Image: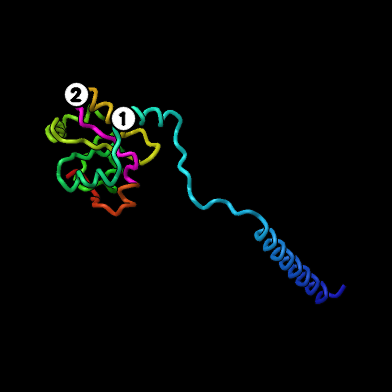
Amino acid sequence: MNLNKSWKYVLVTTACIYLLSFILGTVIHAVTPHAETTSKTIIPEGYMQQISAMPTISVEDAYSDYTNNSTVFVDSRDNAEYREGHIKGAINIPYDKFRQYYPKYEKLLTKDKKIITYCHGTGCGLSVDVAKDLMAIGYTNVYVMTEGWPGWINANLPISVGKEP
């Protein structure tokens, strides 16, 4: 067999396979229903029951309180996430270190101010846990911002990076 003919055969065969693959892919794409492009949040089991028992607040209403300086925002995420970005002026009380961090901010958390807890958004129970801890020690004006940090960011509202205020 001639070497030039074998290379030509390989190249022609490869080109034919590529062309057939392209045509077949185009036809399949044209006739197949496309998947939804909207992302759906997977909500952990039990979250809806937890959040339905809590006072909640929307990002819009939370921002209204924010502009009136009548609210203390509590970021319930861990320290590293808080330092990467948080609501401007928010304090950080990680959900799993409530007893350690609460005394540090007790003076800011007066009973006459509204307290809004937040975390990773819909489906995140960290802010629910911190809100429950606050309610257990006598705070009554506590709300969970269910849209959380992602909702605040998506609304292009004031944020800070770094340590506590």
SS category of the residue bearing label 1? loop
Tell me which colouring the rendered structure shows: rainbow
Which label's residue is closer to the chain start, 2 or 1? Answer: 1
Q: How many badges with numbers are in the image? A: 2
SS category of the residue bearing label 2? loop
Viewer-nearest residue: 149 or 98: 149
Horizontal side of 76 relative to 14 (left or right) equals left
Query: Which quadrant of the figure has residue 139?
Result: top left
The residue wearing badge 1 is: 54
Say if 99 sits above or below 81 in the image.
above
At x 49% / y 50%, what residue is drawn? 38
Viewer-nearest residue: 134 or 104: 134
Q: Type of residue at label 1?
A: Met
- Does the magenta portion include 79? no
The residue wearing badge 2 is: 138
Mark in the foreground, 2 or 1: 1
At x 30% / y 42%, what residue is drawn? 58
Say if 140 sits above or below 154 in the image.
above
**Magenta segment, which residues?**
137-150
Q: Quadrant of the N terminus?
A: bottom right
Horizontal side of 69 relative to 58 (left or right) equals left
Viewer-nearest residue: 51 or 78: 51
Query: Which quadrant of the figure has residue 52?
Result: top left
